[in-house]
Image (cartoon, coloured by chain):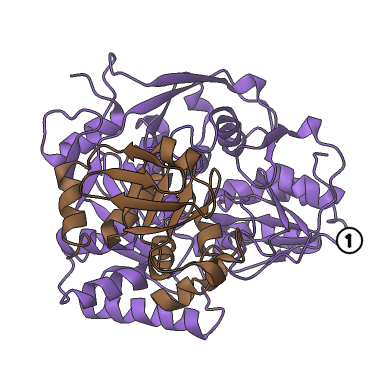
């Protein structure tokens, strides 16, 4: 997968990813229409299929709302990379089949608009703009099995 | 190998003699919880995957609390989805208008969680029940769906931080001040993926309501769970509310902790978290003049009877400052009724506050107290993120019911 970076800082919370005022409708399209609204009003207008969200520490903290990874996935984002993730967001992303990688070096180096290429199988992140390559350790087999079948309930 | 309290509960539910941090296990659940926001997503997931029956009709709890009584048509449709599912599945613990309360206040009150239980809930504040000596953690809707169908969930065994409470707190220092202080010390990701285990000779001064508040906000430090070992305070509470036999687990004396944080309760002062993160803490004596527009006293963090008593003790014989909209929300019907019988509701109304039916409403910016642009609110809730209670540039200051009530009278953040 290949796409442009939308870069954010530390502690992006799920209220910013999808504000609760939109949680009266759980359809992916309705949620995607307001994705990142309280942190980046321009996101919905500029995101293209395949793009990636890159953030720094504790991405997805706060509420357990699965609406957050659903909104991100439905907006066309192919992968989220961060230094680390809040644990419920991490579980939720795996459970719905949204690729998610913890890689502090890649996350810190990446800037808005950089082009990244990610090979999940090889655990490889390449920043094509900066000409840098990063590797992440593979998921444990139990988690990999959930990702491979496309989600926990698949 | 020596285990922490959290690890022991997980091991017992996974049928294992021992577990180690980082190990992935599948464990049996004693209760699966969802609300009117998260359950519809789980119900749709189940339907999309061919349906199926819940593993145990008595071990699923669905609580309609976030946008209830419904604030709009879409919210009403979400509750209808839950209501139909509960009826079709024969779910015994379905709580709708008239019976509902804010889930994390309601479940302990109804006796649905006991000591030693393993609980997941599609709500991040499910970690509240660690106060009862349970391992309890928040998950998303897909985990909830899987848990409802199979009675199991996968867990990565957490390591733990030991939080030693020492000394006796001063008057007006509550569980809320303890947890805000802790989050201020370790940060909003200070306990990421870890357990917070509360121990020490100061624990005996923490009432059950204090402990519920403390464990409720473990998630705001990133923790997987927060837990107090079952003691006399726990047993007395469970005896009154819960018919299950408590399963008492204790940490091994030589259990390994990643770090230890000591909190001297006698040195704590009423504490306030400034926008826009719970870790931005200041003690109330070091705050300048910050005028406020609204006060909210309630939520799964601080909507219990002791919270209402603390607020009413301040408001008795006083008036809230003109222009400060003061909203009091008892967390359950039974708390509401008790507050009524104790005269607290009269005190609130005479002081110029309004009293609402139980709802999560304003805490997450749903309804019943949304903030306009630039407005400032002191809330006894749990999150002060950007836009959490309304406009993006509104500001939320988190505090205890005592500080919130004093601030309502003063018209600015402070104590009387």
Q: Where does the image place residue B15, in percent across and percent down from the top left? A: 10, 38
Q: Is residue A82 above or below residue A75?
A: above
Chain (purple): B
- The residue sitting at 56% across, 56% down in the picture is B299
Q: Position of residue B44 (x, y in %)?
A: 29, 75
Up/down of B299 relative to B57, above or below: above
Q: Residue placed farthest to the top in the image?
A: B254
Observer able to see residue B291: yes
> Which residue is pictured at 85% across the width and 56% down the height?
B319
Residue B377 falls in which quadrant of the image?
A: bottom right
Quadrant position of residue B63: bottom left
Q: Secondary structure at mark 1?
A: loop
Residue at screen point 36% across, 41% down: A102
- Is residue B330 positioned above or below B22 on the image? below
The residue positioned farthest toward the bottom in the image shown: B73
**Tally of numbered discs:** 1
B61 versus A88 height, above or below: below
Q: Return the residue at label 1.
A: B322
Left or right: residue B212 compared with residue B362: left
Q: Is residue B342 left or right of residue B300?
A: right
Residue B80 percent location from the top left of the image: 39, 82
* Residue at the image point whose x is 35% and y is 73% from the top: B40
Nearest to the observer: residue B246 or residue B12: B12
Q: Nearer the viewer, residue A146 or B86?
A: A146
Query: Dot 1, crowdedness within 10 Å: few (<14), some or many (≥20)?
Result: few
Position of the N terminus of chain A, as image quadrant, is bottom left
Whether residue B13 is visible here, answered yes or no, is no
Q: Colour of chain A?
A: brown
- Front residue (pair B133, B136): B136
User: Quarter of the image containing the C terminus of chain A?
Assistant: bottom left
């Amino acid at each position: 997968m290949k796409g442009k970076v939308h870069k954010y800082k530390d502690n992006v919370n799920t209220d910013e990813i999808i504000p609760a005022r939109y949680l009266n409708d759980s359809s992916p399209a309705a949620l995607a229409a307001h994705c990142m609204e309280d942190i980046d009003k321009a996101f919905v207008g500029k995101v293209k299929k395949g793009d990636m969200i890159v953030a720094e520490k504790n991405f997805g903290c706060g509420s357990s709302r699965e609406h957050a990874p659903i909104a991100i996935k439905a907006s066309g984002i192919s992968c989220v990379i961060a230094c680390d993730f809040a644990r419920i967001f991490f579980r939720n992303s795996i459970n719905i089949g949204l690729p998610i990688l913890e890689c502090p070096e890649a996350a810190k180096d990446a800037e808005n608009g950089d082009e990244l290429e990610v090979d999940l199988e090889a655990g490889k992140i390449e920043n094509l703009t900066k000409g840098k390559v990063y590797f992440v350790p593979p998921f444990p087999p139990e988690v990999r099995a959930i990702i491979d079948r496309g989600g926990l309930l698949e | 190998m020596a285990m922490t309290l959290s690890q022991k509960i997980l091991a017992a539910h996974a049928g294992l003699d021992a577990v180690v941090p980082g190990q992935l296990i599948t464990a049996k659940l004693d209760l699966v919880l969802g609300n009117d926001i998260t359950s519809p997503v789980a119900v749709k997931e189940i339907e999309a995957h061919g349906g199926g029956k819940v593993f145990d009709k008595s071990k699923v709890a669905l609580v309609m609390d976030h946008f209830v009584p419904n604030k709009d048509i879409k919210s009403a449709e979400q509750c209808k989805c839950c209501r139909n599912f509960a009826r079709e599945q024969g779910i015994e613990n379905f709580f709708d208008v008239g019976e509902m309360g804010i889930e994390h206040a309601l479940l302990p009150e109804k006796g649905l969680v006991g000591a030693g239980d393993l609980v997941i809930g599609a709500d991040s504040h499910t970690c509240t029940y660690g106060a009862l000596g349970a391992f309890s953690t928040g998950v998303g809707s897909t985990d909830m769906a899987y848990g409802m169908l199979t009675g199991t969930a996968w867990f990565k065994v957490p390591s733990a931080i030991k939080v030693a409470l020492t000394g006796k707190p001063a008057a007006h220092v509550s569980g809320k001040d303890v947890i805000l202080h802790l989050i201020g010390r370790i940060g909003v990701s200070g306990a990421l993926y870890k357990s917070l285990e509360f121990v020490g000779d100061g624990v005996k001064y923490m009432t059950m309501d204090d402990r519920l508040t403390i464990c409720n906000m473990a998630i705001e430090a990133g923790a997987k769970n927060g837990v107090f070992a079952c003691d006399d305070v726990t047993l007395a509470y469970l005896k009154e509310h819960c018919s299950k036999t408590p399963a008492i687990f204790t940490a091994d004396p030589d259990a390994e902790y990643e770090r230890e944080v000591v909190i001297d309760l006698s040195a704590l002062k009423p504490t306030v978290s400034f926008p826009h993160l719970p870790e931005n803490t200041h003690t109330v004596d070091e705050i300048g003049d910050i005028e406020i527009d609204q006060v909210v006293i309630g939520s799964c963090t601080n909507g219990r009877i002791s919270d209402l008593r603390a607020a009413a003790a301040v408001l008795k014989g006083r008036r809230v400052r003109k222009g400060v909209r003061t909203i009091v929300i008892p967390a359950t019907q039974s708390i509401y009724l008790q507050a009524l019988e104790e005269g607290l509701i009269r005190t609130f109304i005479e002081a110029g506050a309004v009293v609402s039916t139980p709802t999560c409403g304003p805490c997450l910016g749903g309804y019943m107290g949304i903030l306009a642009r630039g407005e400032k609110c002191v809330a006894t809730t749990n999150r002060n993120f950007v836009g959490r209670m309304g406009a993006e540039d509104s500001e939320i200051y988190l505090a205890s019911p005592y500080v919130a009530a004093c601030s309502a009278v003063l018209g600015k953040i402070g104590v009387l």
